[in-house]
């Protein structure tokens, strides 16, 4: 029996596979596509995702594959400078294509021993108290202790589990694609600037992913497509470009064409017995703010260590259920902010007035920091029962006596940062590392940090620490 089957080999599924393999869990990834998707699609990692790559020793690989950027126009088309007070050692996003992200994560998953099987389509599921049965389209049957559906917005796993997916349907479509153009860049840029003054959902970006002469075209569609599985045609792009810009820029040679809607839906439950959902299988929303890929990676980062602890037999009661408790509210908040951004991106006088109002409000540093922190996910705080303000928050990278904090997290273990010099994790040494001299940059007596970088406890009392260790890391050994 396989420990965990992950259905879906996109960023969410591959990130989850790496997290599980770090903990020694056997993982098989089932991906329906026979080859990696060469379309560029999602084009960036937000700050929190950048931090996660740093926490697992992968950041250098991603930096080599992308370019740093400071976010502009990151909320409903409102352009503001990056807030200097954002609490992170990585005050930037990383422009890296989804194709490159998947290749890098697949490379790491392979290094750690995950098995990725392509051309495998799941058509049936069953589960009992001991495991999950999986049926593939070719008739193959597999069995695993747990299964996670990371198979996108049209998730087969979610449908087979019978999980409700309530929300709002698509009301507007946007055409999105990469293609060549006969018109020169300067002329295109001038037209785009003029059109965006009244239609912020319109855009053209040159040299996509470093490809000279390839443009990313974004233009409102003529209406809502009845069959959303059918991609738009180049003629549709030309028609809509002429409608909004008065010219089609001589677009040609499309690399890929797609349409995206403004539907927002969220799974009622992220767990059904031994099966779980993550990424777009658990929540869909418009691509405004570039949060979809990032939210999926962050789902996997939260789930991975908890599922591994369950498989490895040391998970305390309720640990796996805390995945839904923590990530469902985050997904709901993302749906809310993308709905708000779609309203802001409207062409009506009311939408323009809202953008102007928000722009003035974001001149206030605290407002700018909160909005940026929401989009980049550095302000995510899980409800872990109150206490110190750090509890439930992720720690930024800081310099410690033993090196960088994130450098100590590469193995995916818990950490006790102990400035008191007298606390002990003796019964949990196989799961938690103690850093005896946390350094002056950690401005608390001691902090217990989960494998996902979020703080589970702050204090200096050994009895309290033992309670929190048992709560998050199970029973002590010995």
Image (cartoon, grey):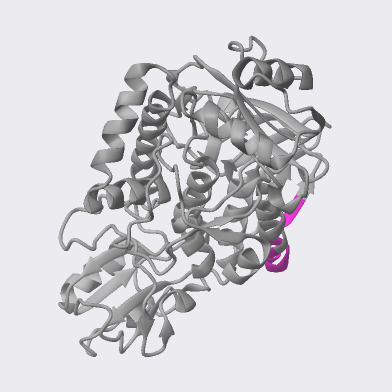
Residue 383 versus residue 404 in the image, above or below: above
Q: Give me the residue at 57% from left, 53% from top.
A: 16
Identity of the residue drawn at 48% across and 53% down: 46
Left or right? Give the position of 300 relative to 227.
left
Residue 381: x and y in percent read: 29, 52
Q: Residue at x 47, y 40 (%)?
A: 289
Observer-nearest of 19 and 365: 365
Which residue occupies the foreground of this view, 345 or 334?
A: 345
Image x and y of residue 443, in percent: 21, 77
Q: Position of residue 432 (x, y in %)?
A: 39, 75
Q: Is 448 covered by the magenta stretch?
A: no
Q: Is residue 421 left or right of residue 297?
A: left
The boundaries of the magenta stretch are: 108-116
Relative height, residue 41 to residue 355 (above, below)? below
In this orientation, which residue lies closer to the viewer: 322 or 78? 78
Classify 348 as above or below 301: above
Q: Is residue 121 left or right of residue 190?
A: right
Specify whether 349 is left or right of 96.
left
Q: Is residue 99 visible?
A: no
- Pinpoint residue 417: horizontal percent, then vertical percent: 31, 79
* Residue at x 20% of width, y 76% of height: 444
Where does the C terminus fall, quadrant-wise? bottom left
* Viewer can see residue 167: yes
Q: How many marks?
A: 0
């Amino acid at each position: 029996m396989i420990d965990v089957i992950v259905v879906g080999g996109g960023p969410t599924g591959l990130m989850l596979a790496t997290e599980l393999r770090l903990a020694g869990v056997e993982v098989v990834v089932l991906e329906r596509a026979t080859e990696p998707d060469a379309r560029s699609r999602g084009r960036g990692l937000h700050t929190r995702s950048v931090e996660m790559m740093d926490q697992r020793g992968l950041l250098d690989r991603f930096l080599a594959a992308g370019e740093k950027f400071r976010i502009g126009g990151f909320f409903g088309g409102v352009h503001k400078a990056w807030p200097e007070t954002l609490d992170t050692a990585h005050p930037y996003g990383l422009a890296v294509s989804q194709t490159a992200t998947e290749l890098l994560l697949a490379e790491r998953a392979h290094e750690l021993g995950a098995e990725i099987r392509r051309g495998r389509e799941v058509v049936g599921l069953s589960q009992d108290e001991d495991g999950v049965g999986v049926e593939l389209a070719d008739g193959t049957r597999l069995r695993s202790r747990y299964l996670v559906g990371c198979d996108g917005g049209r998730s087969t796993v979610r449908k087979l589990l019978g999980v409700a997916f309530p929300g709002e349907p698509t009301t507007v479509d946007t055409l999105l694609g990469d293609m060549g153009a006969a018109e020169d860049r300067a002329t295109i840029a001038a037209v785009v600037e003029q059109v965006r003054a009244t239609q912020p959902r319109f855009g053209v970006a040159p040299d996509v992913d470093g490809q000279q002469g390839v443009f990313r075209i974004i233009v409102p569609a003529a209406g809502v497509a009845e069959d959303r599985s059918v991609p738009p045609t180049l003629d549709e792009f030309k028609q809509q470009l002429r409608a909004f810009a008065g010219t089609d820029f001589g677009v040609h040679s499309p690399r890929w064409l797609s349409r995206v809607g403004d539907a927002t839906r969220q799974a009622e439950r992220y767990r059904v017995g031994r099966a779980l959902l993550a990424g777009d299988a658990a929540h869909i929303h418009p691509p405004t703010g570039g949060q979809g890929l990032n939210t999926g990676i962050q789902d996997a980062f939260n789930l991975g260590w908890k599922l591994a602890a369950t498989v490895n037999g040391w998970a305390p009661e309720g640990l796996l259920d805390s995945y839904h408790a923590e990530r469902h509210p985050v997904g709901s908040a993302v749906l809310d902010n993308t709905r708000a951004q779609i309203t802001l991106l409207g062409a009506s006088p009311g939408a323009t007035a809202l953008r102007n109002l928000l722009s003035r409000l974001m001149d206030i540093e605290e407002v700018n920091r909160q909005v940026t922190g929401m989009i980049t996910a550095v302000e995510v705080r899980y409800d872990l029962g109150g206490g110190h303000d750090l509890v439930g928050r992720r720690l930024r990278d800081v310099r410690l006596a033993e090196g960088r904090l994130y450098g100590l997290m590469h193995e995916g273990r818990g950490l006790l940062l102990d400035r008191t010099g007298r606390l002990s994790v003796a019964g949990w040494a196989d799961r938690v590392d103690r850093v005896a001299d946390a350094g002056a940059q950690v401005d608390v007596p001691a902090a217990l940090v989960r494998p996902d970088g979020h703080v589970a406890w702050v204090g200096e009392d050994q009895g309290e620490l033992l309670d929190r260790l048992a709560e998050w890391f199970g029973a002590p050994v010995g």
